């Protein structure tokens, strides 16, 4: 009997995340009741497992993979030596999930990059940038994941042309000299279930400063073009003065026309892979 035939009559199964994604190259170790190793199986790129038959008996199955919490279960093999392990589910280390490792491309059509500033100390003015691009690289060790984004500063839109023209001027974004706003995230820290802090740097108005994003992972799902999408929400707060934006107008009552801080709000959809679908 060839090896494929033996595997078909032996152990079968798969290793998955809680969302059903394949865990590539996970290691499954099978031990007998005395703790001796009787089999070691590596999952393939699709998370599938296959191994030759084992003698009938009771075994312990231990599943490990980089970036995931190990899991164990009991396996009873009948005299035929054939057993189905089913889907062995692994959770991310630390209990926090992110999409499967690999590249994800931000879809600007289904994403939003916005900012909120205080006006006259009484109300908020909301704006959004209409032109941006970015990429997320989810690493096998999630903490090593990275993100890059580029925003066209002149694409700011607050719904008021006079105000937008002023924001594009040297008093604020200075879009002629500094046409791009750029962010580079170089790592993550888990802060709770489905919540992360992205550590990185922001270049705005020609000045680069460290800026962390508070990130929530909202899940994944199929799209209408045969792809897979992941959704995220992120926020941070910036001090205008940190980026050399000090213009302000103080009213007679001593109230500043524009607040000193700016809240950034991101709603992101990213498509699995290096390219966006052609629609």
Image: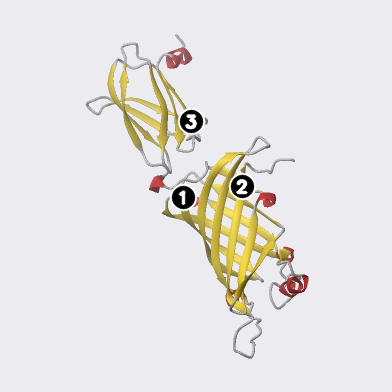
Disc 1 secondary structure class: loop
Q: Is residue 17 above or below residue 209?
A: above
Residue ID at (64%, 39%): 223
Residue position for label 3: 47
Residue ID at (43%, 41%): 66
The quadrant where residue 90 appears: top left
Q: Quadrant of the C terminus?
A: top right
Residue position for label 1: 194
Residue position for label 2: 270
Q: Are marks 1 and 2 in contact (CB under 8 Å)?
A: no
Closer to us: 257 or 271: 257
Q: Is residue 170 above or below residue 100?
A: below
Disc 3 secondary structure class: loop
Q: Is residue 178 above or below residue 72?
A: below
Q: Are marks 3 and 1 in contact (CB under 8 Å)?
A: no
N-term-proximal mark, 3 vs 2: 3
Q: CA distance from mark 1 to mark 2?
A: 16 Å
Q: Is residue 46 above or below residue 83?
A: below
Closer to us: 163 or 69: 163
Disc 2 residue crowd, few under 14, some 14–19, many 20+, Cα 10 Å: many
Disc 2 secondary structure class: strand
Camera-near label (3 vs 1) is: 1
N-term-proximal mark, 3 vs 1: 3
Residue 104 lies, in percent from the top left, at 60, 45
């Amino acid at each position: 009997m060839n090896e494929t035939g033996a595997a078909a009559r032996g152990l079968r199964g798969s290793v998955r995340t809680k969302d059903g994604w394949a865990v590539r190259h996970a290691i499954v170790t099978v031990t007998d009741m005395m703790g001796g190793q009787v089999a070691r199986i590596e999952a393939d790129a699709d998370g599938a497992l296959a191994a030759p038959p084992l003698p009938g008996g009771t075994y312990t199955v231990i599943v490990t993979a980089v970036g995931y919490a190990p899991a164990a279960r009991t396996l009873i093999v009948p005299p035929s030596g054939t057993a189905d392990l089913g889907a062995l589910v692994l959770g991310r280390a630390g209990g926090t999930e992110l999409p499967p490792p690999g590249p994800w491309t931000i879809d600007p059509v289904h994403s939003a990059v916005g900012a909120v500033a205080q006006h006259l100390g009484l109300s908020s003015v909301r704006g959004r940038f209409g032109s941006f691009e970015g990429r997320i690289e989810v690493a096998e060790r999630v903490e090593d994941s990275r993100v890059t984004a580029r925003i066209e500063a002149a694409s700011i839109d607050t719904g008021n042309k006079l105000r937008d023209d002023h924001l594009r001027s040297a008093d604020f974004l200075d879009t002629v000299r500094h046409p791009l706003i750029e962010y580079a995230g170089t790592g993550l820290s888990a802060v709770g279930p489905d919540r992360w802090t992205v550590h990185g740097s922001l270049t705005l108005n020609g000045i680069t400063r460290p800026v962390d994003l508070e990130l929530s992972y909202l899940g994944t799902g199929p799209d209408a073009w045969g792809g897979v999408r992941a959704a995220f929400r992120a926020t941070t707060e910036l001090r205008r003065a940190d980026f050399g934006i000090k213009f302000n107008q103080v009213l007679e009552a001593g109230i500043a026309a524009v607040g000193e801080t700016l809240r950034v709000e991101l709603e992101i959809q990213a498509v699995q892979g290096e390219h966006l679908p052609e629609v």
